[in-house]
Amino acid sequence: MGTSADRSAGKGGDWTPLKHATATYVRGLGNRGSTDRAGRVLGRHVPLLGGTRGAVSSARAGTAGISRLGGLLAGLGTGPAGEAFTSLGLSHLVGQDRFTVLDELVTFIAGTGDDLDSVAARDAACDVLDEVFGDADSWEELNEVSVSREQLGTVLERFLSLYVYNRVPVVAERLSRMTDPTAMRQADQEMRQIIADLVAIHLPSDPFALDWSGPEGRAIAERAVTSTYELLTALDGEDQT
């Protein structure tokens, strides 16, 4: 369930409608309207992050992570990993093993994990980097990993959807009370899929040539995060801006 379990449930205020929506969702899991109820839970978590504007402005690790991950993927799409790392100031990773490389890439993308936002981004980065590098283990194998334009977009969208899910409070704690592991997995997958369906990152015609650390790269990241939280807010049917 990602890092959402690390967020302690509060009391009163915006927590009350979220807790009610979560309890209703859990009771009706698998019944008609389950997806709509799951969407309501996701929509009602946004006010806890300060509404749409607050959720976006506080998503610092996620927004920066999209830009940094984009730069890494662009490098992997145009040359060997060693060249990509060097261009990002990570030349010390050249020749290292998988554990060292991925561990430092996670920190490069998502920070050191000194707050919940960074932890959410780190967990997302860890998942997508495992997918990008696949079974590559030795440096020789890592250095040969490459990505296509389509993969670049897919990986960025998956990172954002995982990051957003990891910021959702309460849900993990509530689902952990369920005694049916199959139902728990179903709920987990349903929530993740709803977010994934909302995420869209619009890329330029040649994302490999983009300066992901510059204004255009940051703008792409900011638009994607903003769009996602606007759509999540709309799932509750009320304006929470």
Image (cartoon, rainbow, N blue to C red):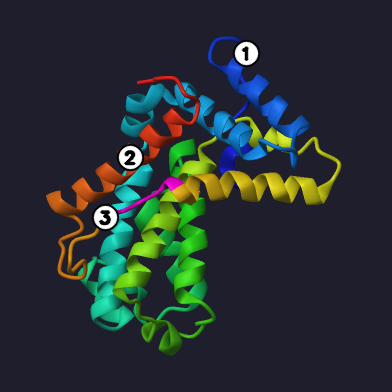
Residue 225 visible in the displayed image: yes
Magenta-colored span: 198-202
Q: Is residue 1 above or below residue 41?
A: below
Instruction: Kindly identify the residue that appears in the image at 35 percent across and 25 percent down.
Output: 54
Q: In the figure, is residue 131 to the left or right of 181?
A: left
* Residue hosting label 3: 202
Q: Quadrant of residue 95?
A: bottom left
Where residue 132 sits in the image (x, y, percent)?
44, 72
Q: Say which amino acid is labelled 1.
A: Lys
Label 2 sits on a secondary structure element that is: helix
Q: What secondary structure is the magenta-colored segment mainly?
A: loop
Q: Secondary structure at mark 3?
A: loop
Disc sitting over residue 227 in the figure: 2
Give how far apart the Cα atoms at labels 2 and 3 are.
Answer: 11 Å
In the orientation shown, which residue stands out farthest toward the right?
179
Give residue 11's mark.
1
Say whether residue 2 is left or right of residue 75. Answer: right
